[in-house]
Image (spheres, rainbow, N blue to C red):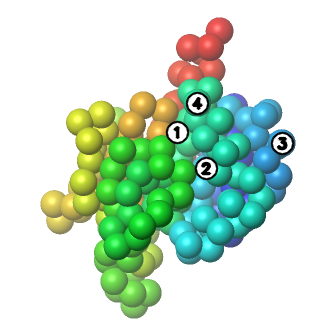
Amino acid sequence: MKIGVLALQGAVAEHIRSIEAAGGEGVAVKRTEELQDLDGLIIPGGESTTIGKLMRKYGFIEAIRAFSEQGKPIFGTCAGLIVLAERIEGQEEAHLRLMDMTVARNAFGRQRESFETDLPVKGIDEPVRAVFIRAPLITEVSPSIDVLSTYNGEIVTARQGHLLASSYHPELTDDYRLHAYFLDMAKEAAAAKE
């Protein structure tokens, strides 16, 4: 499975390392035409407003929506989760508007309030190591969204069909099981097309 990592900002190399540790092929995506060869796409963390501006500048909003319409999986981590959301608290305009959820930016506070924890995630046997850095939160979800994990009662991992989102950075640990879960989503999507 060939998984692209949107290389506009964020921990691109770390995601590629995690994809490869999970048995996939990871590639950095800098141009929209590179999406065509992919089985899945990861939108990494960074700063959601900056990522949104760069996506608009380089034509990625329409290109990624078209990618999603083909049923190809997309995984947004931290700022990537914000980019996937239908609604962002306190903001008029959302970015991709693919996942039917509302998110709050920097819900866990500033950089110094960053932390790591072991997080139980539905569909993965053992708790996943999760790094929260100025993390967003999913504050509302539609019935079409499957909540995969919560932290202190707040939603931090969710899935809607071929879309996956986490508030935290799974790529900043040696635990690549969430990437393996995403690779399985890509395999299912590819099999469904055959």
Going 64% across and 57% down the picture, which residue do you hit? 15
Cα separation, mark 2 vs mark 4, equals: 16 Å
Quick check: 186 above or below 156? above
Identify residue for label 1. 182
| Circle on res. 49 | none
Few, some or many residues within 10 Å of mark 2 (<14, 14–19, 20+): many
Q: How many marks?
A: 4
State if disc 4 and disc 2 touch (CB < 8 Å).
no
Per the image, label 3 sits on a secondary structure element best described as helix
Few, some or many residues within 10 Å of mark 4 (<14, 14–19, 20+): few
State if disc 1 and disc 2 touch (CB < 8 Å).
yes
- The numbered mark, 3 or 1, whose residue comes first in the sequence reads 3
Cα separation, mark 2 vs mark 1, equals: 9 Å
Looking at the picture, tell me which residue is in the foreground, 137 or 3. 137
Seen in the image, is 139 located left or right of residue 169?
left
The furthest residue to the bottom? 112
Amino acid marked by disc 4: Glu
The image quadrant of residue 131 is bottom left
State if disc 1 and disc 4 touch (CB < 8 Å).
no
Identify residue for label 2. 42
Amino acid marked by disc 3: Glu
Looking at the picture, tell me which residue is in the foreground, 84 or 135. 84
| Circle on res. 33 | 3
Going 47% across and 60% down the picture, which residue do you hit? 94
Identify residue for label 4. 69
The C terminus: image quadrant:
top right
The image quadrant of residue 35 is top right
Judged by depth in the image, the label closer to the viewer, 2 or 3, is 3
